[in-house]
Image: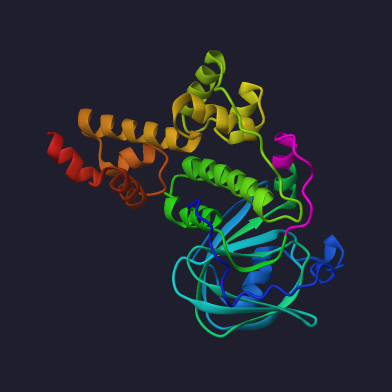
Amino acid sequence: MNKPILHDPLEALLVAPNARHSDSPVADRRRADVEMARVLKTAPLQLASDPSNGAIAHWKHGALHDVVEPMTDHVIMTYPTGVQRLERRTGKSVAIGTARSGVVTIIPAGSSARWDIPGFVDVIQLYLPHTALERIAREANAPAPGDLLERTGHPDPVVSGLLMSAADVLEGNATLDLLFRQQLTDLLATRILAEHTGVPTTFEPIMGGLSPHALRRAVERLRSDSDTDVSLAALASDAGLSRFHFCRAFKESTGLSPHAWLRQQRLDQAMNMLRDTDASIASVAAQLGYASQTAFTAAFKKLTGETPSDWRRRLR
């Protein structure tokens, strides 16, 4: 992943800097999900969002020949499957690239261009508020972010991999899924600031974990019942840290991200209930906050390789 990657030979980034962004007032810009639904002429297969962290959407759509109007958020996208030609036009400037695994396309907030895509595309999109970039930069004591660079099929396996994990990891558990999306947004914002702005941001390495008291408070909150706020904001506030510093310090202390730690803790709870009680699978799923028995079974099998029923049978 750290090896240099050659740019797509089809990628011809000829967009002039002063032609990138629209002068349209922010109030006239459309929400990204609304504009994407208009131009793609379909509904997303999956959409998850919360106000401060933007949204993640998975689309499969056909040919596109239309102007994408200015949007309120930055749109960062990657392509899980397939290969497809991409062409973006802004005035007389043209950017050409290829949609394929390992590349990203970035539409900065407020920009507008005509897109011509001749056929089917499988795409995952992040709608990232500029305020999220500003917060990450502020918490990391880095300069305020400048404009994002337009990218068309640009190699970046790190951002691509993070975005694809967004579609893979959502488990039908509201608490776990929200915490995962918050972590993912922060990771993506950090990478985008470092690699996709006119003035790349350098982040100093974070040394040291949480204090024993702060770690104990974080673990208590994560182990609490499903009605307790386990958002990154709440966890970081308890520790007296920013979200940016809390996530790094928590992983330094535990070896796991907050989401991975909570997922493992829920798995341990599930195993204890399956082994030590006669509670039904549906009851275990509900007590652990899963939307359905199907969602719980899929999440359990992903971590253990067995369904809850098979695991219980083998232990008894």
Residue furthest to the top in view is 213
Name the residue at 55% across, 75% down.
Answer: 98
Name the residue at 37% across, 34% down.
Answer: 264
Give the side of residue 263 with respect to residue 112, left or right: left
Is any part of residue 9 visible from this angle?
A: yes
Magenta residues: mostly which secondary structure? loop
Q: Position of residue 244 (x, y in %)?
A: 63, 35
Give the side of residue 182 with respect to residue 226, left or right: right
Quarter where residue 10 is shown: bottom right
Name the residue at 56% across, 32% down.
Answer: 248
Does residue 141 belong to the magenta stretch?
A: yes
Quarter where residue 66 is shown: bottom right
Position of residue 137 relative to residue 24, above or below, is above
- For the residue pair 158 and 308, the one nearer the viewer reads as 158
In the rendered view of the protein, which quadrant contains the C terminus?
A: top left
Name the residue at 51% across, 44% down.
Answer: 180
- For the residue pair 204 and 19, the one nearer the viewer reads as 204
Q: Which residues are magenta?
A: 135-148
Colour approach in the figure = rainbow
Q: Position of residue 91 (x, y in %)?
A: 80, 81
Give the side of residue 106 with respect to residue 4, left or right: right
Does residue 159 belong to the magenta stretch?
A: no
- For the residue pair 291 and 27, the one nearer the viewer reads as 27
Q: Position of residue 263 (x, y in %)?
A: 41, 37
- For the residue pair 155 and 262, the one nearer the viewer reads as 155
Is any part of residue 229 visible from this angle?
A: no
Q: What is the total number of numbered labels drawn onto the structure image?
A: 0
Q: Position of residue 187 (x, y in %)?
A: 58, 45
